[in-house]
Image (cartoon, rainbow, N blue to C red):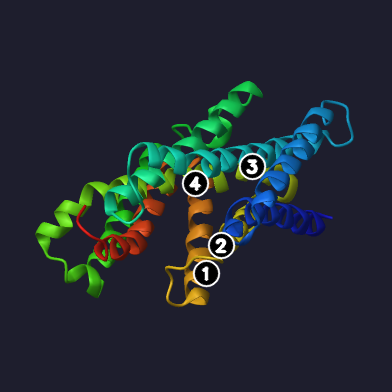
Amino acid sequence: MKLRLFIFLTTCGFLIFALTMTFVPVLPAWAHYTTRAGFLVIFGALWWVARDGHRLSQFRPVFFAYFTAVLGLSLGFFFADRGLELLGLTTHTPVGIAVAKLLQASLIVIGILVVARICGESFASLYIRKGRLMLGLSVGVITAAALLVLSLLQPAVRALGAARLMSLAPWMLLFVASNAFMEELLFRGLFLGRYEPLIGRWPAVLSTGLTFTLAHMQVKYAPELLVFLFVTFGFSIAWGWLMLKTESLWGSFLFHAGADLLIILPILSSLGAA
């Protein structure tokens, strides 16, 4: 029973992220509206129906998570680019890339938090809480520092020079902080605590890890996609375990931000200075 439920939840998670994020670049325009609207109607209705006493009541937290994820992703999809245009920026510069990520992440995070409040969900249920703070910060800082060193050792980054690196630092930090917090909240903070009672602790980590990894299967910045996905899966399992172990997202947020440095530093180093 739990295996079937694990497969079902993982499949649902994959479809939601695939159709509202991963495959968006190749979907026709009409699909962006109909798919998102359909998900919102279906999961919103299921959340409303599955109240106490209903046979689906145990799945109500999951319906909330699916609805909230789609709403947050839709806000980021429809409005982030417009915000960037209003600021007169493009994603062809380090500033534009960082600000674009900030706008997208802010819209997704705000959407999740607002829906949580409206639906009576606490921020603590999203792992936005103190938890075992010192353990989380210790692991997060150590892993982020180690990944920063690895990032700086990449040939493309080493060729930049100290002055260029310092000029990129604010935009690099803005990007990784925005992306890491958004993705930890969206993929794990929103789902881990709602999957765990249904399928167990480690299956919840595995399910969210698979969903997170498959959501990145369309990336263009990885020279070897299979290697990238393998490493991403390993990271996602570590982040999920750390979030459950520390009972908060702060450690996995810092760890995740460090991992993002491996990707964003070479990308920013290849762009112009503006």
Residue at 52% from the left image edge and 71% from the top image edge? 230
Residues at circles 2 and 3 in contact by the CB criterion of under 8 Å = no
For label 2, the residue is 213
* Secondary structure of residue under mark 4: helix
Q: Which of marks 2 and 3 is nearer the N terminus?
A: 3
* Residue 18 appears in view: yes
Q: Would residue 202 be found to the left or right of residue 178 on screen?
A: right
Amino acid type for the residue under numbered disc 4? Glu
Q: Residues within 10 Å of mark 1 (few under 14, many from 20)?
A: many
Residues at circles 4 and 2 in contact by the CB criterion of under 8 Å = no
Q: Would residue 225 be found to the left or right of residue 169 on screen?
A: right
* Secondary structure of residue under mark 1: helix
Q: How many labels does the image show?
A: 4
Residues at circles 2 and 1 in contact by the CB criterion of under 8 Å = yes
Between residue 226 and residue 26, name the one nearer to us.
26
For label 4, the residue is 184
Residue at 72% from the left image edge and 40% from the top image edge? 37
- How far apart are labels 4 and 1 at the CA level? 17 Å
- How far apart are labels 4 and 2 at the CA level? 13 Å
The disc at residue 229 is 1
Q: Would residue 55 be found to the left or right of residue 83 on screen?
A: right
Q: How crowded is mark 3: few (under 14 residues within 10 Å), some or many (20 or more)?
A: many
